[in-house]
Amino acid sequence: MQGMKIKTFEFSPIAVNTYVISDETGECAIIDAASFYADEKEELISYIKDNVLMPKHLLNTHLHFDHVFGVGLVEERFNLRMEAQGDDEFLLRDMPRQLQIFGFGTENAPALSIGKYLKDGDILSFGKQKLKVLEVPGHSPGSIAFYNEAAACVFTGDALFLSSIGRTDLPGGNYDQLIGSIREKLFSLPPETVVYPGHGSSTTIGYEEKSNPFFQ
């Protein structure tokens, strides 16, 4: 994978995939910092420190509550600001209600804001790596994916999963829009592209295009 290392953590009661991607330069990017419990927060910070990594980007595929639990910690420890698509900003203001709906105490509501607004086609660089921002709305209005062409992989958040797609019954969700986003933005990638989703196991674009029941 062109020297890129991908470390996957599964965090919180909702089993969110947090990714730390790095290369031989030591620079790294963190995608969907979701550490919830104290030991999870320690695990994430320790991995970065033990591997002498230098975080350059704190990225979010979308801003549902379960994908941002660890954002404040990473911002504080590494002097970073969250980077996300602005159409999901309303979800940060709506955080206490989201937590209540899913049975979490509102005391867990992080006070967050977007530090850098991302849009379709943006290129994010760290080390020798480049991530291209792909807007894939539907699961949420501001859902985005991060595509590394050289490493032949894409981080899709909750847009596309192994044999499934993201739910669209939450505020701002739109089923037809999500189907269109996947067809137009994700299925246009090479079939061998590895998909790293927001929950569950990895897959490939080719497998999902041929076998995902939502597209048959």
Image (tube, helix red, strand yellow):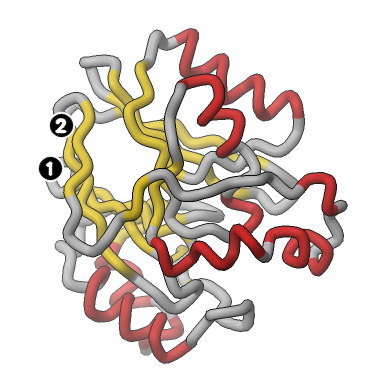
Q: Residue at x 66, y 20 (%)?
A: 42
Front-most of residues 47 and 216:
47
Front-most of residues 89 and 16:
89
Q: Residues within 10 Å of mark 2 (few under 14, many from 20)?
A: few
Quadrant of the image occupied by residue 71:
top right
Numbered disc 1: secondary structure: loop
Of the numbered discs in the image, which one, if any, rests on residue 39? Answer: none
**Is 36 rendered above or below residue 166?**
above
Q: Residue at x 50, y 54 (%)?
A: 198
> Where in the figure is residue 142, as x and y percent of width and height?
42, 68
Residue type indicated by callout 2: Gln
Residue type indicated by callout 1: Ala
Of the numbered discs in the image, which one, if any, rests on residue 150? Answer: 1
Marks 2/1: CA–CA distance: 6 Å
Quadrant of the image occupied by residue 54:
top left
What residue is shown with label 2? 2
